[in-house]
Amino acid sequence: MVSLGILTIQLHIPGCASLKEKRGRLKPLLSKLHKEFNVSVAEIDYHDKWQDSIIACALVSNNNRHTQRVLMSVPEWIDHNWLDVDLINDAIELI
């Protein structure tokens, strides 16, 4: 059985004064999430807003519980380890 999970996270990035600065602050976060959780990560919305972003993390595995457990740990990790962004909202969808 294949399990596909998608986590969407809305972030606020205080103090950003340009899109270039936003990219500079998001890129290390996306890279770290990929390395830490073995998920695919991308910014999917609010591309033109300096201080806001919506990112998505996707994970494919052979177990629904594993997929959900990994994706549930991502927002918690961001809250505890990435202090220069504010997590506004998150949602998981399992397919």
Image (cartoon, rainbow, N blue to C red):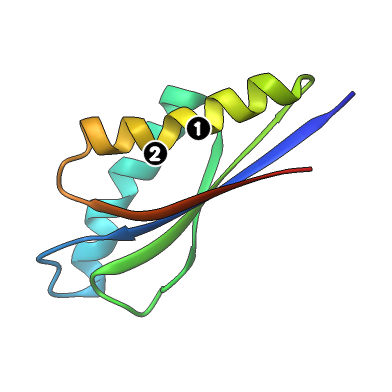
Query: Which quadrant of the figure has residue 19?
Result: bottom left
Contact check, label 2 and label 1, Cβ < 8 Å? yes
Query: In the rendered view, does 84 fall on the left or right side of 67?
Result: left
**Residue 67: x, y in percent?**
65, 27
Which residue is labeled 2 in the image? 75
Q: Is residue 4 above or below residue 14?
A: above
Q: Secondary structure at mark 2?
A: helix
**CA–CA distance between discs 2 and 1?**
7 Å
Nearer the observer, 66 or 21: 66
Farthest residue toward the right? 1
Badge 1: few (under 14), some or many (20 or more) residues near its Cα, within 10 Å? some
Instruction: Name the disc covering residue 72, or none.
Output: 1
Query: Which quadrant of the figure has residue 70?
Result: top right
Q: Residue at x 74, y 37 (%)?
A: 4
Q: Amino acid at mark 2?
A: Pro
Nearer the observer, 84 or 32: 84
Q: Could you tell me how many numbered marks the image carries? A: 2
